[in-house]
Image (cartoon, rainbow, N blue to C red):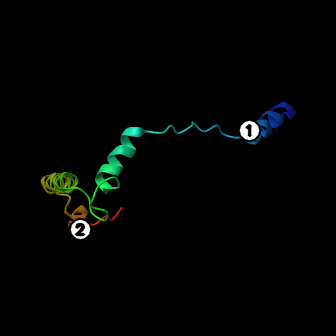
Amino acid sequence: MFIQEEITLWENEQNVKPVFAKKHYDPRRSKTREYRKGIKSVHYNKECTEARRDDNRKYRVQMKRLMRSEKYELLHGYQRTGGRITW
């Protein structure tokens, strides 16, 4: 049914561990997080105003797109947090 060489090749493929790419540090992402969270600022538990406005704008655009494409089952309410960190 199977040749011994095929069996050994298959076993060798199964034993090889997958190689994962190294995740590099992204300074832009961490700076954005620090800015949004207010880590190096006065407001400790709230996001900055620009981030809240941007988030609200993204939500409105997404809901308008869903309404125009008539995908009403995907609509969901906006979670108003008053700027409190939820993520």
Other residues around mark 2 within 10 Å, as few (<14) / some (14–19) / many (≥20): few
Residue linked to disc 1:
16
Residue found 16% across the figure and 51% down from its top:
61
Q: Position of residue 8 (x, y in %)?
A: 83, 35
x and y, in percent, of residue 83 in the image: 23, 64
Q: Which residue is mark 2?
A: 79
Where 65 sits versus 82, above or below? above
Q: Quadrant of the C terminus?
A: bottom left
Find numbered disc 1 in the image and state the secondary structure of the residue it sits on.
loop
Displayed quadrant of residue 56: bottom left
Q: Which mark is residue 78?
A: none
Q: Amino acid at mark 2?
A: Gln
Give the side of residue 50 with respect to residue 36, left or right.
left
85 with respect to 1 (left or right): left
In 3D space, how far apart are the residues under numbered discs 2 and 1 (Cα atoms)?
46 Å
Residue 42 position within the rendered picture, expressed as x and y whole percent measured from the top left: 27, 59
Residue at the (20%, 68%) spot, across then down: 82
- Is 49 rendered above or below residue 6? below
Question: Which residue is depicted at the point 39% across and 45% down?
Answer: 30
Q: Name which residue type carries label 1.
A: Val
Q: Are marks 2 and 1 in contact (CB under 8 Å)?
A: no
Q: Residues within 10 Å of mark 1 (few under 14, many from 20)?
A: few
Viewer-proximal residue among 1 and 33: 33
Residue at horizontal 26%, vertical 59%?
A: 47
Q: Which numbered disc flags the more N-terminal residue, 2 or 1?
A: 1
